[in-house]
Image (cartoon, grey):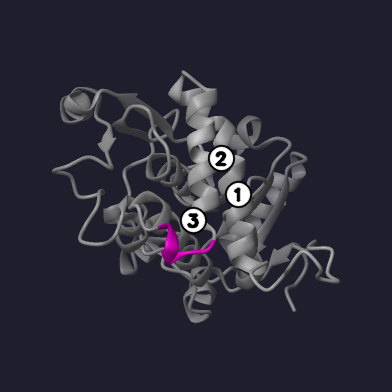
């Protein structure tokens, strides 16, 4: 059982990916981090010596701190943040405990660096499925502050170069369709996020996005809702923000609601 002001790796994994997920800060010393340069999904690197500088940003949020073993650095950081009134907890066992639990890790080399204001991504305008699903995945599992540019197809590559943005779901880039897989599939592979729930969600997204609704019972509904969102909003950014809760709901279904039916005795609630 986790100790005082600690959270277990399994419990943290259940919270990651939700719209109200905690802020996760990796405080591992540089030498320790270089031994295994991978990040827990949604986390970002931070320096324990400058935690106090982050208090204005972290106020009112739940924060999880990670160090190599879950001892002095994360425990001291938790105590420091709590002295400022920030609700902070340490990851039980630290990075080593997460690895021992067999939970996913994002290779640092695969993830764009997080600058002030969040990472910047660019794709084709007028999104429907893949170009909403991918931003959802990025916001929930890579960078909660990520921003997305929707531009004419012919301009995606040039905009990526000029604005230092990561292109996706367009011909000629890595984060796009490969074989039978869609861009969402590719992101799961590149970012090491092939968990059971995300793989199940990917089946639905792929079937809806590649014109194979019979491959997944849920695909036709996702396609219909996606077309509806695209008709409701002329502004792509507004459409993205409005549609994100649809993928939040689908993820919760994929994570722990697959067996539930309309007549189920369960009320569907849970952590």
Camera-nearest label, 3 or 1: 3
Q: Position of residue 82 (x, y in %)?
A: 75, 47
Q: Position of residue 178 (x, y in %)?
A: 21, 57
The answer to whether residue 50 is visible is no
Camera-nearest label, 3 or 2: 3
The residue beneath circle 3 is 219
Q: Residue at x 76, y 44 (%)?
A: 83
From the viewer's perspective, tell me whether residue 164 is left or right of residue 135. Answer: left
Q: Earlier in the sequence, mark 3 or mark 2?
A: 3
Please say if the residues under marks 3 and 1 sit with CB atoms less than 8 Å apart.
Answer: no
Mark 3–mark 1 distance (CA, rounded to whole Å): 16 Å
Q: Classify mark 1: residues with Cα within 10 Å, few (<14), some (14-19) or many (20+).
A: some
From the viewer's perspective, tell me whether residue 229 is left or right of residue 131. Answer: right
Mark 3–mark 2 distance (CA, rounded to whole Å): 17 Å
Q: Earlier in the sequence, mark 3 or mark 1?
A: 3
The residue beneath circle 2 is 244
Quadrant where the C terminus sits is bottom right
Q: Position of residue 65 (x, y in %)?
A: 59, 56
- Magenta stretch, overall SS: helix
Give the residues in magenta: 213-217
SS label for mark 2? helix
Q: Classify mark 2: residues with Cα within 10 Å, few (<14), some (14-19) or many (20+).
A: some
Please say if the residues under marks 2 and 1 sit with CB atoms less than 8 Å apart.
Answer: yes
């Amino acid at each position: 059982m986790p100790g005082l002001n600690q959270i277990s790796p399994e419990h943290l994994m259940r919270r990651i990916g939700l719209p109200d997920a905690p802020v996760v800060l990796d405080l591992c010393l540089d030498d320790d981090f270089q031994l295994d340069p991978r990040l827990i999904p949604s986390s970002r690197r931070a320096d324990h010596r400058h935690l106090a500088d982050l208090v204005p940003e972290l106020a009112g949020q739940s924060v999880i701190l990670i160090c190599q073993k879950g001892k002095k650095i994360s425990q001291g950081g938790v105590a420091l943040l709590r002295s400022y009134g920030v609700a902070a907890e340490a990851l039980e066992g630290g990075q080593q405990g997460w690895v021992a639990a067999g939970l996913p890790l994002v290779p640092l080399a695969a993830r764009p660096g997080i600058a002030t204001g969040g990472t910047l991504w660019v794709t084709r305008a007028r999104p429907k499925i893949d170009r909403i699903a991918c931003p959802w995945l990025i916001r929930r599992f890579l960078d909660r502050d990520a921003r997305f540019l929707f531009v004419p197809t012919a301009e995606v590559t040039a905009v990526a170069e000029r604005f230092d943005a990561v292109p996706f779901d367009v011909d000629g880039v890595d984060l796009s369709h490969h074989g039978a897989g869609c861009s969402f599939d590719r992101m799961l592979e590149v970012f090491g996020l092939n968990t059971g729930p995300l793989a199940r969600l990917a089946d639905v997204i792929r079937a809806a996005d590649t014109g194979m609704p019979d491959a997944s019972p849920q695909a036709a509904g996702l396609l219909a809702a996606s077309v509806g969102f695209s008709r409701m909003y002329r502004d792509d950014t507004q459409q993205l923000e409005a549609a994100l809760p649809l993928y939040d709901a689908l993820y919760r279904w994929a994570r722990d609601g697959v067996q539930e039916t309309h007549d189920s005795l369960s009320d569907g609630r849970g952590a």
